[in-house]
Image (spheres, grey):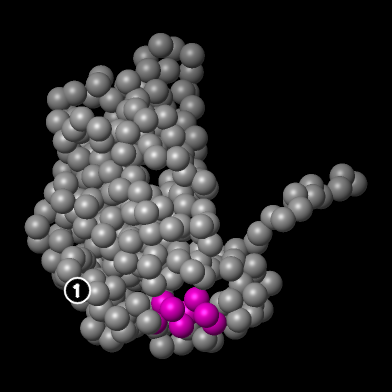
Amino acid sequence: MEAWPRLPAGFQFGVATAAYQIEGGVDADGRGRSVWDTFSHTPGRTRDGDTGDVVCDSHHRYSQDVALIAGLGAQAYRFSVAWPRVQPDGRGAVNRPGLDYYSRLVDALLEIGIEPVVTLFHWDLPQALEGAGGWLNRDTAARFADYAGTAHAALGDRVPTWITLNEPFVHTTFGYGWGTHAPGRRLGLGALVAAHHQLLGHGLAVQALRADGLCGRIGITNACTPVRAASAEPADVAAAARYDAVANGCYNDPVLLGRYPAELAELAPAVDLSAVRAGDLARRSRPVSTSAATSSGRCWTTSSGPRGTPSALAWSTSTSPPDGGRPSRRTTGTGS
């Protein structure tokens, strides 16, 4: 019998959550509204009308959650900070009780030897910023950097690893492209403006944390999908390259290589890169000390579409998702 592969020395087992999926306490400690509050309370937006008002109630039961994590034998816990809990309107005055909640959580983890890992944004943009355009508004990137610096000033002495954004591809595609996640916009490939501003925010946040004396690691979590052409036919190979550019390269290349994939130009005029200003790519590709990836499955593409699904390019250019727009279950705590 073949032996099980051995993990390298120092490998960490960890668990991860997202604030809106587990915290509840939406009206506690001065928290402001997020785009998910608005979205989930809009009739027809979520299956069975589910909301994140209570969910796992981790805001009130975090000590029990920490004990459960310890019981799993996990060595690290990646949680996201809810931006509207720290800055109810996404800018300006800091809500100290909101920050204190995360400080207590960090201390509870450290007390039993679990390493805290902070994600600064897991899709719960303050509703006030969405009202000003959300991630379609370039100013949101600057506001994100301000918030990141505030969070690090409060927690950076105890948190060694920071993630700026969780899966911007998912937030862009489902939230701005197809509208099945908050904030519910249906812009097709026009949603890539939101992707650009998120990644600009990533670069500015890296700069802000380093300016605040970051001593640990900082990076980004991207959702990556392996893409394979269904045949060696040139049309299939080209379709795979374009889909790979939209799903993967658009998010990884600017951070790691300082450029956008050349294939995006082939999708003009649906892809509008006018939001990219001089110096943006340099700001977004600031060196990171950690980079995480989640896999969302495998996609086989043909020139007319992936096997058994709508066209790969239709996935990208359409404002409707391939599943027909079934209501989201993200508010129930499922998913990444």
Identify which residue, 269 or 322, lies in the foreground.
269
Query: Looking at the picture, how far across and down is residue 315, in whole percent?
Result: 29, 37
Residue highlighted by disc 1 = 93
**Residue 17 vertical placement versus 2 (above, below):** below
Q: Quadrant of residue 308?
A: top left
Residue 300 % position (x, y): 46, 30
Q: Quadrant of residue 51?
A: bottom left
Q: Residue at x 54, y 82 (%)?
A: 108
The answer to whether 269 is drawn above or below residue 33 in the figure is: above
At label 1, the amino acid type is Ala
- Identify the image quadrant of residue 147: bottom left
Q: Residue at the location (32% across, 20% down)?
A: 262
SS label for mark 1: loop
Q: Which residue is pictured at 18% across the width and 65% down the height?
A: 91
Report crowding for label 1: few under 14, some 14 to 19, many 20 or more residues within 10 A (C-alpha).
few
**Residue 73 placement (x, y as % from top left):** 68, 72
Q: Farthest residue toward the top?
A: 234
Left or right? Give the position of 198 relative to 19.
Answer: left
Disc count in the image? 1
In the rendered structure, which segment of residues is drawn in magenta? 101-108
Main secondary-structure element of the magenta-colored stretch: helix
Specify whether residue 285 is painted magenta.
no
Asked if residue 116 is positioned above or below residue 173 in the image, the reply reads below
Instruction: From the viewer's perspective, tell me whether residue 239 is left or right of residue 140.
Output: right
The outermost residue toward the right is: 1
Which residue is more in the foreground, 333 or 168? 168
Residue 333 visible? The answer is: no
Give residue 322's position: percent from left, percent from top. 30, 44
Q: Is residue 3 visible?
A: yes
Identify the image quadrant of the C terminus. Answer: bottom left
In percent of the image, x 64 and y 80: which residue is there? 112
